[in-house]
Image (spheres, rainbow, N blue to C red):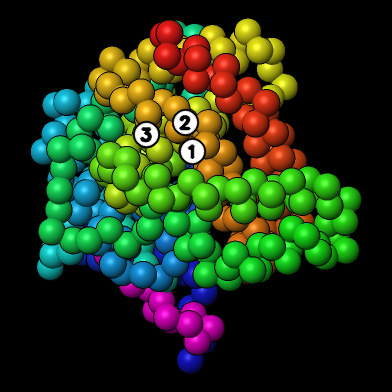
């Protein structure tokens, strides 16, 4: 009997949620980590996600439990979040048939919100971005579920990717493969920052922790035609972490070393103004921001190094990540004091 390919299996998935009904499946823009399809049923659209990065049922159950808990607080958010659709028999996760002798991938269906990814063009939009993050952070602080988080906090960097152990990272950075010889200097500096970060971990464990989305950026948000934020998406990596890590992740994406110092200060200050209208940080948390922004960049590097080792991404993708990680960590080392200062005098 012919084995079905992934597209055929995807095409049959909506029947799990809509038995006996007609639907159409279409391709649209999706995230980098997972496969996304859009399902239209009786005039209503849904988002079908096929998880590509893992086949861990517990991770998805935790993500869905948080999303369902967030629904009860939706009045406190000015935008929508994806809500997992419950199957007729209960639960929210479907497992595909095995392909190529591997355990079947996991899939879920979510509510759909129309919109497009934002491009931050001015300080007002950046402030709205900060407000959206602050709203979510305040609500997440009040949520608890019976399940334990599966993903570790950011600062446990040895757990980012199973094949990226500290020793594997050291070897890649200090003795890179020939394909990455041109990046030797940058990789050496990245490893220097990676090694230095370990010294800060004991202090981080003592800071306030709460649920953190951990990946809020333009690719995981939607805006309408007027630029208003309509949704925050992709809660796949939500976990318990240092509270201020949410802010650090966002500032990490806003900081572009090619921008002028004046423009960078204006954008970061605008974001923090919006964020701090919902969340008030302690002084020592603000002092940690440069370190945690740097941690976000190191995390992204390790994540994409793992994808390269696994054969998911090509050499060029990782080279771009190396350049970006080097530039931002270098900028943070040179501008950390000023960054903290202009956030303190918001």
- Quick one: SS at disc 3? loop
Judged left or right of residue 43, residue 170 is: right
Magenta span includes 300: no
Q: Which of 259 and 197 is in front in this view?
A: 197
Residue occupying image coordinates x 49% and y 38%:
292
Magenta span includes 102: yes
Q: Quadrant of the C terminus?
A: top left
**Chain-order first, disc 2 or disc 3:** 3
Q: Distance between the residues labelled 3 and 1?
A: 8 Å
Crowding at dot 2, Cα within 10 Å, few <14 / some 14-19 / many 20+, comes out as many
Q: As displayed, is residue 346 above or below residue 48?
A: above
Query: Where's residue 172, x and y in %?
Result: 73, 63
Q: Do the residues labelled 2 and 3 touch (CB within 8 Å)?
A: yes
**Which residue in the protein does label 3 denote?**
244
**Which residue in the protein does label 2 denote?**
289
Q: How far apart are marks 2 and 1 (CA)?
A: 5 Å
């Amino acid at each position: 009997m012919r084995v079905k390919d992934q597209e055929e299996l995807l095409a049959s998935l909506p029947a799990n949620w809509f038995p006996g009904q007609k639907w159409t499946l279409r391709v649209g823009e999706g995230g980098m980590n997972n496969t996304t399809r859009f399902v239209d049923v009786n005039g209503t659209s849904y988002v079908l996600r096929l998880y590509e990065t893992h086949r861990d049922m517990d991770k998805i159950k935790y993500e869905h439990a948080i999303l369902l808990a967030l629904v009860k607080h939706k009045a406190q958010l000015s935008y929508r979040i994806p809500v997992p659709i419950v199957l007729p028999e209960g639960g929210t996760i479907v497992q595909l048939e095995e392909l190529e002798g591997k355990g079947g991938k996991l899939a879920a269906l979510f509510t759909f919100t129309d919109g497009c990814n934002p491009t931050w063009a001015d300080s007002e939009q950046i402030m709205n971005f900060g407000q959206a993050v602050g709203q979510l952070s305040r609500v997440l602080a009040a949520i608890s579920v019976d399940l334990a988080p599966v993903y570790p906090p950011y600062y446990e960097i040895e757990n980012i990717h199973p094949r990226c152990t500290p020793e594997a990272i050291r070897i890649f950075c200090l003795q890179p493969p020939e394909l990455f010889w041109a990046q030797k200097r940058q990789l050496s500096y990245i490893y220097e920052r990676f090694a230095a970060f370990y010294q800060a971990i004991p202090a981080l464990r003592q800071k306030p922790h709460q649920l953190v989305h951990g990946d809020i950026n333009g690719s995981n948000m939607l805006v309408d035609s007027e630029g208003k934020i309509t949704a925050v998406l992709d809660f796949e990596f939500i976990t318990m972490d240092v509270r201020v890590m949410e802010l650090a992740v966002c500032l990490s994406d806003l900081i572009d070393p090619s921008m002028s110092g004046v423009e960078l200060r204006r954008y970061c200050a605008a974001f923090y103004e919006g964020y701090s209208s919902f969340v008030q940080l302690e002084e020592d948390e603000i002092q940690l921001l440069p370190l945690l922004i740097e941690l976000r960049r190191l995390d992204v590097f390790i994540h994409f190094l793992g994808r390269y080792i696994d054969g998911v991404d090509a050499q060029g993708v990782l080279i771009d990540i190396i350049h970006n990680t080097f530039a931002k960590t270098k900028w943070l080392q040179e501008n950390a004091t000023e960054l903290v200062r202009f956030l303190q005098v918001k």
